[in-house]
Image (cartoon, helix red, strand yellow):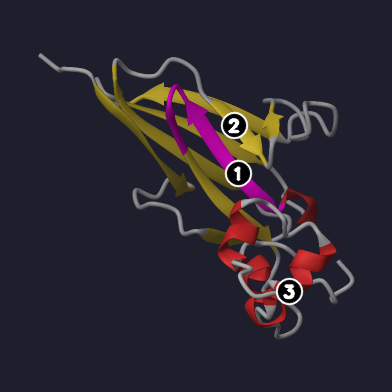
């Protein structure tokens, strides 16, 4: 008999059996498959996928289903009595697909930062704490403040590693 336990989730890139890195790099034009494995009892019923704070709908463009039909597909399969996988496939990735991807099922969630393209075009370093005492660049990344040009400049290295274009690269 299996007793209820705290649900856990882990994110994997493609069909690999190891957890995804904190930031995954993907080549433009390739296909990206993210797999979210949730271990729970009773097993999870539904999975929801997000890019940033927006829900990804299968068959859509990742922005609520309004762009480029069929670029996104989602499949779910039960592996064992306590493990269910949900896979998100993004076809023909471009730089607009860069961002934080997360899955949610019940109370379990996992995420990965995806960066489309090669590394940054220039060397940048975090200057936040020296310019603004108390600024925590890791928190800037966690709170999704890298889209703010001011924070992106102060925390350039951390934001670049998280998949954001360096602020002075024109992107």
Residue in view at x 74 percent, y 30 percent = 70
Residue in view at x 22 percent, y 18 percent = 4
Res. 120 mark: none
Image quarter of the N terminus? top left
Q: Are marks 2 and 1 in contact (CB under 8 Å)?
A: yes
Q: State which quadrant residue 24 falls in.
A: bottom right
Q: State which quadrant residue 133 falls in.
A: bottom right
- Kindly report which numbered mark, 3 or 1, lies closer to the viewer in this rendering: 3
Q: Are marks 2 and 3 in contact (CB under 8 Å)?
A: no
Residue at the spot of label 3? 154
- Kindly report which numbered mark, 2 or 3, lies closer to the viewer in this rendering: 3
Residue at the spot of label 2? 49
- Which class describes the residues within 10 Å of circle 1: few (<14), some (14-19), or many (20+)? many
Q: Is residue 45 left or right of residue 57?
A: left
Of pointers 2 and 3, the one earlier in the residue sequence: 2
Expressed as whole percent of the image width and height from the top left, the position of residue 50 reads 63, 35
Of pointers 3 and 1, the one earlier in the residue sequence: 1
């Amino acid at each position: 008999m299996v007793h209820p336990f705290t649900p856990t989730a882990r994110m994997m890139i493609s069909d690999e059996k190891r957890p995804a890195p904190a930031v995954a790099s993907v080549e433009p034009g390739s296909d990206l498959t993210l797999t979210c494995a949730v271990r729970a009892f009773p097993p999870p019923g539904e999975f929801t996928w997000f890019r940033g704070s927006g829900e990804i709908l299968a068959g859509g463009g990742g922005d609520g289903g309004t762009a480029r039909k069929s670029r996104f597909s989602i499949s779910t399969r039960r592996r064992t009595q306590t493990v269910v996988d949900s896979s998100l496939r993004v076809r023909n990735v471009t730089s607009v697909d860069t961002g934080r991807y997360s899955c949610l099922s019940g109370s379990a969630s996992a995420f990965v930062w995806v960066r489309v393209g090669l590394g940054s075009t220039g060397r940048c370093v975090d200057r936040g704490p020296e310019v603004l005492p108390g600024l925590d660049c890791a928190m800037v990344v966690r709170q999704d403040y890298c889209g703010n040009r001011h924070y992106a400049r102060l925390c350039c290295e951390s934001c670049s590693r998280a998949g954001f274009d360096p602020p002075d690269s024109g992107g």
